[in-house]
Image (tube, rainbow, N blue to C red):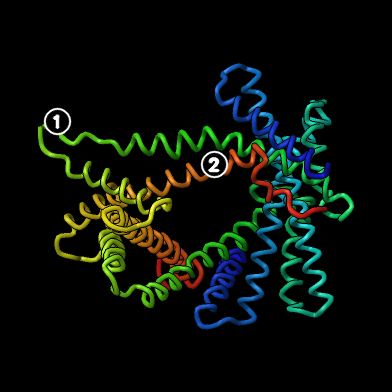
Amino acid sequence: MDISTIIAGLLTLIIFTFLYKDNPFYKMAESLLIGVSIGYVLVITWTNTLMDMLFEPLFQNAELTLLIPLLLGLLMLGRFSNKTVALSRIPIAVMIGSGAGIAIPTMLYNRTIKQLSASVMPLFLPDGSFNFSGIVVIVGLLSTLAYFYFSREHKGKFGSFAKLGTFFLMIFFGTTFGYTVMSRMSTFIGRMEFLLSDFLKITQ
Amino acid sequence: MNRQIPLIVCFSFGLVMFLQYFSNHTISRSVNLAILDYWQIIFAFTLIIGVVSFIKVNLTKISRRIDRPYLIVGLLGMISMPFMALIWGIKADSPFMWMFENVQAPMASTVFALLAFFVASASFRGFRARSLQASILLGAALIILLSRSNLPLPYTEHLSELADWIRNYPSMTARRAILIGIGLGSLTTSLRVILGIERTWLGGER
């Protein structure tokens, strides 16, 4: 067995010890994970963003327009001192403003219009049969939207309709929960498979 | 002035990015791509702020003898990655990638797998069919779980069909309603930000 498998196996076992109770070994592994993850992201961001997108094109190819993001990035470092913290608001303004500008048409199109158009289905299928699922979709969409409409009190017929929306929401939460459990379980099975076959060699 | 200039910058960039959506002109496209690149570069600098803050907070705690061994391990882990990348590079067989594949990835996926137990224990305590809504939630979750398991159940085929129908129609329609709500909420918040009505992002008065 190579050293890589031993280390990966031991660390996996140490993380699983948390199932019994919190202990110093788990805390140590947790701190190591946080540190290594930050270090990894830092290196990848430095290589893929700062070197590839900024420093190399700027200093090797003399792309002078890149002085703008360099200046904005340096202004961001103004957060380190109380005297210069106001300067960091300019790059934040660039990010927030451009993000908001992109979000308006994107959200309107992808999150609203596209979702609405996908919900409108024919009530009769090509063979002439009634499309029950189409009715479920329309009623579900309208009733769930009614539940999120807070400008009118949820009373009377409107209240009942909004309550119907909660049933659809519960179905959504239930299915999402089911899939979340399945994904966590499949990851757990993967780790157990690694422990039992690669690390402990109990199964093949 | 400390607040006026950022507000003007925010409005200008917001307007430019909004208008470029309606244009297919080469200049408009290149401005869009350039600003998206600027985003990534500024984000990289914010990461530096985060890392420096992480080191400062940890060093302060270490000097106060709070959780000293764990924080030292965390700091060493963080410093070791750039150190290894600097000396041996980040190619496939480098020590940096070895650390990623044999230390970070196994631990990260194991922590992720731990959640299976916590989700199971939380659902055992929380999933009581106390009301009609709770029963519907429980029923939908059970149908999905049973349909995706390999248990030798009767009517497995019908269960799978029912799970697909639930996912594609009643569940999807609620998801769409939530997405529409998010879309409209983001739209109004973005408008408020660009027009300077929403100013919380400016922070304190300094």
Nearer mark to the viewer, of 2 and 1: 2
Q: What element carries label 1?
A: loop
Q: Between marks 2 and 1, how big is the CA–CA gap?
A: 40 Å
**In this view, A203 is above or below A131:** below
- Name the one closer to the observer, A54 or A199: A54
Q: Residue A37's image quarter?
A: bottom right
Q: Name the residue under label 2.
A: B188
- What's the residue at 63%, 21% (across, down)? B28
What x and y, as percent, mark residue A190?
44, 63
Residue farthest along the top direction in this orientation:
B25
Q: Name the residue under label 1.
A: A126
**In this view, A74 is above or below A178:** above
What x and y, as percent, mark residue A88?
79, 46
User: Relative to residue A123, is residue B95 drawn left or right?
Assistant: right
User: Relative to residue A86, is residue B135 drawn left or right?
Assistant: left
Find out whether the residues at labels 2 and 1 contact each other: C-beta distance under 8 Å.
Answer: no
Q: Is mark 2 on a helix, strand or loop?
A: helix
Mark 2 residue type? Thr
Mark 1 residue type? Pro
User: Relative to residue B158, is residue A83 drawn left or right?
Assistant: right
What x and y, as percent, mark residue A78?
84, 49
- What's the residue at 64%, 48% (across, down)? B92
Checking the image for residue B158, the label placed there is none
- What's the residue at 59%, 70% (across, down)? A11
What x and y, as percent, mark residue A58?
81, 30
- What's the residue at 58%, 69% (across, down)? A6
Chain letter for mark 2, please: B
Chain letter for mark 1, please: A
